[in-house]
Image (cartoon, helix red, strand yellow):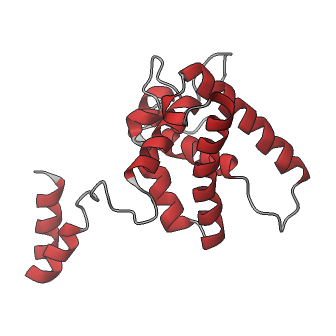
Amino acid sequence: MNRREAISRVALLMGGTVIGAEFFLNGCVTAPKNYNELFSQAQVALLDEIGDTIIPATKTPGAKAVHIGQFMAFMVKDCYNDKDQAIFLDGIKKIDDVSKAKYKADFMTITPAQRTEMLNELDKEQKDYTKTKKKEDPNHYFRMMKELTLLGYFTSKEGATQALRYVPVPGRYDGNLPYKKGDKAWAT
């Protein structure tokens, strides 16, 4: 039995109407790729590349493999206020502007080494900004992108099960578990 069948049977057992059950089941359908009116497909693709530069594929999948661009677009649209949405969208433009000024090409066409160099400079810029930021100052766009990349990646199935140590049914809690340098962090 799959999830859809189980939900349907539970809805019928609970006395749900056909219309209510159908509405409930349609909530389980994955959103289409073009669901977000704030972001274009090109911007989502750019966010995938930014995320993949922050967390590249190694022995584990990179951020692009977990569709980090779609995750960021979803989170910005649904969870950020209008002010932060504007900062984030402006930040996407700024990344291309910086890339064009520095490398005479947009971010999507520069080499992976150039992407890493550029994002490292932006990371240093946002760290310096954050140190001197007042409470009423706006957030830095690159910090938002980096935080969303980390959140989306490590809460995805791939990030939690392959990049972190994962035990589907953990045993008892041990707050003093020995940790050796180089061990993966725990997802569970």
Count of numbered badges drawn on the protein? 0
The foreground one among 104 and 133 is: 104
- Residue at position x 17%, y 81% in the image: 20
On the picture, is 83 further left or further right than 16? right
In front: 54, or 14? Answer: 54
Residue 83 visible in the current orientation: yes
Residue 108, horizontal then vertical, whole percent: 49, 34
User: Residue sitting at 38 percent across and 51 percent down?
Assistant: 41
Give the answer, above or below, for where 95 lies relative to 141. above
Q: Residue at x 47, y 35 (%)?
A: 63
In percent of width and height, residue 182 lies at: 63, 16
Q: Is residue 152 left or right of residue 14?
A: right
Q: Nearer the viewer, residue 184 or 96?
A: 96
Quadrant for residue 98, please give it: top right
- Classify residue 54 by image quadrant: top right
Residue that sits furthest to the right in the current view: 132
Residue 58 x, y percent position in the rendering: 48, 18
19 relative to 113, above or below: below
Does the image show residue 176? no
Position of 160 relative to 75 (above/below)? above
Image position, residue 82 (x, y; %): 60, 72
- Please tell me in which quadrant of the rendered image residue 126 appears: top right
> What's the residue at 18%, 55% (across, down)?
3
